[in-house]
Structures are given as structure tokens and as C-alpha cells.
Image (cartoon, helix red, strand yellow):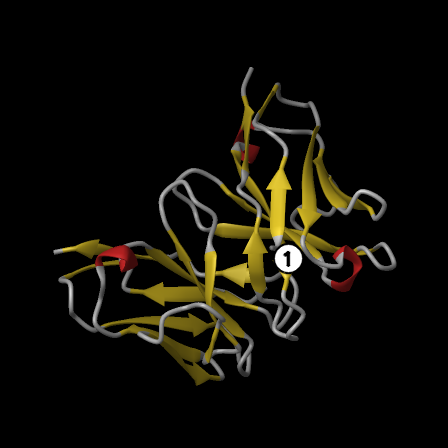
Amino acid sequence: DIQMTQSPSSLSASVGDRVTITCRASQSISSYLNWYQQKPGKAPKLLIYAASSLQSGVPSGFSGGGSGTDFTLTIYNLQPEDFATYYCQQGYSSPLTFGEGTRVEIK
Amino acid sequence: QVQLVQSGAEVKKPGASVKVACKTSGYTFTSHATHWVRQAPGQRLEWMGWINAANGNTKYSEKFQARVTITSDTSANTAYMELSSLRSEDTAVYYCARDKEGGYKEFDYWGQGTLVTVSS
């Protein structure tokens, strides 16, 4: 199975900050990497697919990058509604696997 | 609009089975695979398997292969996930999710989740 490791596991930031979350795959997954946002008690929401493509309706302040084994999710100008947990997910091979999540908290 | 609406919360005893329904609307059910993902309390998301309703083909995570069955009813635009031989570690929120079919196994719409509690 492909292991997905995110860092940090949590971070504190202020409104207006830029934050970057990293995701590392245990083997190369090309660009088969997706990012989700999840708020407490809610289903995940797709933000970025294919490593860097912005899902329709997602604000342009979200940006994804990387390929191979190392990926990033950057949130520019952090907004109050962006405080949530973020997960990466590989779609390269079965079983599809997720990272452990990064919780973005208000400083 | 695209919607996936899941059946309600369940409480089961160890050893029992549970079947969760995912009723879809707003798109062609047979044009998008349906995945099942679960999340135990405080844990990461865990993929269980998927079904292609157009032909009934399924693929399961090896972890659940022996205990999970995913089916679909195209006349009702509904997918089902049945998990057997339940144990306490199966207590989780179970989600269905639509495959966007962009080729990257990305899930663009999700059900609201169904809490399954396994307790004696």
C-alpha cells in the first residue's frame, strides 16, 4: 500500500496568513494527488485534484503543487472559514489512501 | 443539483452486519463510480471500495475484502455498502462519494455520512 504522510499534523495561524501543508507519498504517484477540506461533523470537500487543478467553486486562494512523491497545499490569505482539517489522498493505485490530516487552527 | 443522501445512523452488536444506502440524484448514476470511505473517531479517512454501477464491477480494499459487499440498484440510483462480522473497531462514520471520473480517483460529491456504532 502507498503510505501518505502529512506535515505538520497541526498548525496555528492568523487570518490573512499564508500556510503551506506538505504531503509525501511512500512511492512515486505522478500527479495522482487530491486535497480535501473537512470541517467538524461534515463530509470532506474536494479542493484540488491532479495535484494542482482547482476544483470548480473553490476559492483561488487555494493552490496545489508537486509531483512524484512530494506535494504541497498552500492557502493564501487565510480566511475564517478556512480553519479546518486538510487531507491528501492518492489516486494512483488501490487501495486508495489518505494522509493523517493537518488541522489548521486559529492563533 | 448533485446529491448523495445516505441512510440513517445504525447501532449494531458485535458479529452483526450493517447495510448503508446512498441514494443519488442530479446526475447519471451509471456514469460515475461510487466509492465508500469510512472515518473512525479521530482517525484519518479510510477507503473501502467502489462500484461501477454501469456494469456492476467492484473493487475492494484488501483490508475489507472478506467482509464488505458493495452493490447498486440502477433503477433507484442507489448504491449500498454492507459490512459483516462487525466489531467495535468498525464504529465509524461511513461516507459514499462520487468519482468525478477525471482519471485521478477524485471524489467531488459526498454523502452526509452514516454513523455506525458497534456495541454490545
User: Residue B70 appears in which quarter of the rendering?
Assistant: top right
Where residue A82 appears, as percent x and y from the top left, is 28, 59
The residue sitting at 41% across, 73% down in the picture is A24
B99 vs A88, nearest the viewer: B99
User: Residue A20 appears in which quarter of the rendering?
Assistant: bottom left
Is residue B93 visible in the rendered structure shown here?
yes
The residue sitting at 49% across, 84% down in the picture is A68
On screen, residue B66 above or below B13: below
Q: Report the residue marked by disc 1.
A: B98
| Crowdedness near tag 1: few (<14), some (14–19) or many (≥20) residues, C-alpha within 10 Å | many
Q: Secondary structure at mark 1?
A: strand
Position of residue B70 in the picture relative to residue A70 (left or right): right
Position of residue A87 in the picture relative to residue A18 (left or right): right
Where residue B29 appears, as percent x and y from the top left, is 75, 55
User: Residue B38 appears in which quarter of the rendering?
Assistant: top right
Position of residue A7 in the picture relative to residue B104 (left or right): left
A10 vs A45, nearest the viewer: A45
Q: In the rendered picture of this protein, how many numbered marks are placed on residues?
A: 1
On screen, residue A75 above or below B118: below
Q: Report the residue that reaches farthest toward the front.
A: B1
The quarter of the image holding the C terminus of chain B is top right
Is residue B61 visible in the rendered structure shown here?
no
The quarter of the image holding the N terminus of chain B is bottom right
Amino acid at circle 1: Arg
The residue sitting at 65% across, 49% down in the picture is B63
Q: Report the residue that reaches farthest toward the top.
A: B120
Q: Using the image, name the chain to which the residue with label 1 belongs.
A: B
Position of residue B8 in the picture relative to residue A15 (left or right): right
The residue sitting at 31% across, 74% down in the picture is A61
Where residue B53 appears, as percent x and y from the top left, is 81, 55
